Image: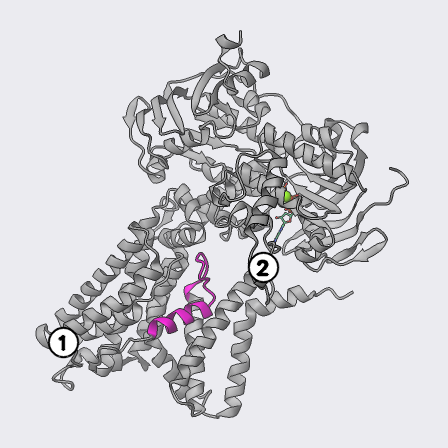
Amino acid sequence: MTDAKPILRLDGIVKTFPGVRALDGVSFSVMPGEVHALMGENGAGKSTLMKVLGGIHQPDEGAIYMGDDRVVMAGPLEAKAKGIVFIHQELSLAEELSVAENIYLGELPRKSFGRVDWTTLTDKTNAILKKLNVGFDANTLVGDLSIANQQMVEIARALTVDAKAVIFDEPTASLTDAEKSVLFDVISDLQADGVGIIYISHRMEEIFKITDRITVLRDGQYQGTVNTRETNEESVTQLMIGRKLDLTRNASHHEIGDVALEVRNLSCGKLYKDISFEVRRGEVVGFYGLVGAGRTEIAETLFGLRDPSAGQIFLDGQEVRISSPADAITRGISLVPEDRKGQGLVLGMNCRDNMTLPQVDDLKAGPFVAEGAEIAIFDQYRDQLDIRTPSWRQQVGNLSGGNQQKIVIGKWLSMHPSLLIVDEPTRGIDVGSKSEIHKLLRALAAKGYAVMVISSEMPEVLHVSDRIVAMYSGRIMRTFTSDEVTEDNLIQAISGIKADQAA
Amino acid sequence: MATVSKQQIGSVLAKQGILIAFAVFIVAFTFANSKFLTVDNVFSVVRSSAILGVMALGVTFVVISGNLDLSVGSMMSFSTIVVLDLHDKIGPFLAIPAMFAMTLALGALIGFLVGYLKLNSLIVTLGMLSAIHGLTLTYSGGKNMDIADKEGTWFSVFGQGSALGIPVPILIFLLLAAFLGLVLSKTPFGRKVYAVGGNGTAATFSGIRRARTVFFCYIISSACVATAGLIQASRSLGSQNTVGQGLELEVLAAVILGGASLMGGSGTIFKTVIGVLILGFIQNGLLLLGLQFYVQFVVTWIIIILAVWLDIAAKRGKLMSPIA
Ligand SMILES: Nc1ncnc2c1ncn2[C@@H]1O[C@H](COP(=O)(O)OP(=O)(O)OP(=O)(O)O)[C@@H](O)[C@H]1O
Ligand SMILES: [Mg+2]
């Protein structure tokens, strides 16, 4: 590959936003058939660099070359015409349209008189979907799909273009293992065709599994490019955060207190059946399973968003009916939802207002919102969670993906709940902050919080939980203590194999 | 290398476009007609905009919450007719609160339908536009309404009086703007209005009762309409059944001109006041040029289209973006 010329080269790119120097002279190149990882902490400038390449942002300085020619990406359509395909971190699909329409938006196959050729459209789409091995078809409404499946639609979109380079900005943040392996197959096919791949992710295992080179950014500055084979996780991390990462588990086996939450024989239609478990004060209970196992739906029920069809919920020994999120909040329950953009944030509102939204009625000075108190709360969680933003006045929509997620976490921690439910809490969060958040969850438990962690990342569940509830298809298969759980028996449990059958 | 891209110019134009167009307009009209920028004329513009302005303040809440209110024009006719009728029957002291109660009841009905039953606000308020018109006609028996003793009533103070040298309608408009501006920008309720309009799902997930928030937006809107009806009735002491006809579009134009997005979640009271003044000056300028008043209707429509276009352009950062 040494004699090959890069298909794509960015040179000395500078991009500033009011109050932020997002990119400070960054250079980057991709070879044909290469998978090139772009890494860095939340807010390091990865997405911004790719948006410059994709024609969404114009650089203040610097140049883009394709082969030997200098090019200007005046807009996303032009970048696409030049063969650059961008799969965004934040999904950008039209929810009211079908999968097929989304995939071919802007270039729907036509018949005479400009009529859309629906048969061809459906057939072409289904062919691609088959390749991706997904469980939905061309005519499904995108709004009806889970986030993971919506992500697969984005990926399908990339396969319709004759691409020279494909950018994946955190494609796996919401994918399960099965979908991930499909994605990796797609990537290696593209690679074999000589397409250059740019791959952004915070997940080290993936980076070391599929990439050839790694380029690291920190605070908008280029830190270096290394061959993946010649490096290891530790040195990449050090390059990213400028120090060594402390990965020890906060081993404090603190006192486990009274039962804070007990769920008895809870059912909700087909979503989950006959669920019973308890969470004690001082305890972190992990919920692990495939997407669709019913974990999110249980969380939504506990937060008053979904009525159960049968069963009982007890808080501190009292049976309760939780009728709405407002009701759940007054009972001391917080939910960090799985979809930060759809459920967690008002993107057009500033950071401070987003963070204090659930308690805005309680933060009052006379008839008005006590803005000083709000700023104090914001400052506290900005420091604790290391949120990178020029000020609380910044619109949340302008923050980097990981920093947006931290705002959602801060929002719910600042409620000081007695039961904290987090659904995929570290989605899109960098390695350093991730381990901080894991420590934080342990520390909250030590303070007497009851914590439920729903996660599709096995290392995360194994790392933070005192007990792990394994779910499959709406049912609890088994509950493990942290001593008895292993990767193998956990995987077995969530794939629907009962321990006794397997033996 | 030029550092200002075409895209940036486009987005600045789109964001400030209305203000720039307004400035050009003012300068042009001042040259065309020397009366345009005189103290008297400015005063008369603000005074004649006050009724529209008061209604626009309420509609701002509704629009930010992500909904529409097209019923305000015919609701204003209703308030005016009712208060004029009751004035002679039960006296102004009781007539005013009675009229407010009836108008708020209509607002509550809309708020219930849109907030709690989750019906589409366009359909509900368009229906109410015609239903309230029918209600007004039924109430008045189709006749115009006049106060018997026009000289001897203190009721004229709201439309014709002045305090500290400022006409009362202007005072009411400005005080109400200041009050509602505080409500929207400083209170928990105002914060919730933005959240509900900006992302309703996230608002629900934050424990905000969306239905209640939307309901109160319509209550505020109807209270503003009642106030506007009061000023209107007091100014003329007699009225036709159709006095507010067509105002709903002008109100909406003013709100959008000020920069509130029809998609909800953005806009401020201050911007709405600016929008009201822009609309007032444009209409006044056209009259001074000697154009027939009905030219206004066309111009108002053009302004609405322009405002909506700039709103979308500002979001996308460019002026043209054809569908697919
Ligand atoms: N449109 C914008 N307006 C203002 N600031 C922005 C905008 N887009 C990005 N930024 C800022 O630029 C910096 C880099 O953001 P970017 O999204 O590139 O980070 P990232 O490396 O992709 O992070 P993450 O891992 O969290 O996705 C951040 O500080 C962010 O707040
Ligand atoms: Mg990013």
On the image, the x and y values in percent for residue A439 come to 56, 26
The residue drawn where x is 10% and y is 77% is B88
On the image, the x and y values in percent for residue B102 come to 19, 64
Residue type pointed to by label 1: Gly
Give the mark nearer the N terminus: 2 vs 1: 1
Q: Tag 2's secondary structure? A: loop
- Residue B181 location, quadrant: bottom left
Residue A13 located within the stretch drawn in magenta:
no
Q: Residue furthest left?
A: B89
Using the rendered image of the protein, determine whether residue B241 is visible from the camera's viewpoint: yes
Q: Please give left or right for residue B245 compared with residue A7 in the image.
A: left
Taking depth in this image into account, of A364 and A358 the one nearest to the observer is A358
Q: Residue furthest front?
A: A112
Image quadrant containing the C terminus of chain B: bottom right
Using the rendered image of the protein, determine whether residue A89 is visible from the camera's viewpoint: no
Q: Please give left or right for residue B306 compared with residue A154 in the image.
A: left
Taking depth in this image into account, of A72 and A27 the one nearest to the observer is A72
Q: Residue furthest right?
A: A3
Circle 2: is it few (<14), some (14-19), or many (20+) Cα within 10 Å?
few
Query: Residue B324 shows which numbered tag?
Result: 2
Q: Is residue A38 above or below residue B165?
A: above
Taking depth in this image into account, of A264 and A372 the one nearest to the observer is A264
Marks 2/1: CA distance? 52 Å
Chain under label 1?
A: B
On the image, the x and y values in percent for residue B162 come to 28, 81
Residue type pointed to by label 2: Ala
Chain under label 2?
A: B
* Residue bounds of the magenta highlight: B247-269
Question: Which residue was labeled with disc 1?
Answer: B141
Q: Please give left or right for residue A302 compared with residue A407 in the image.
A: left
On the image, the x and y values in percent for residue A315 come to 33, 25
The residue drawn where x is 29% and y is 50% is B116
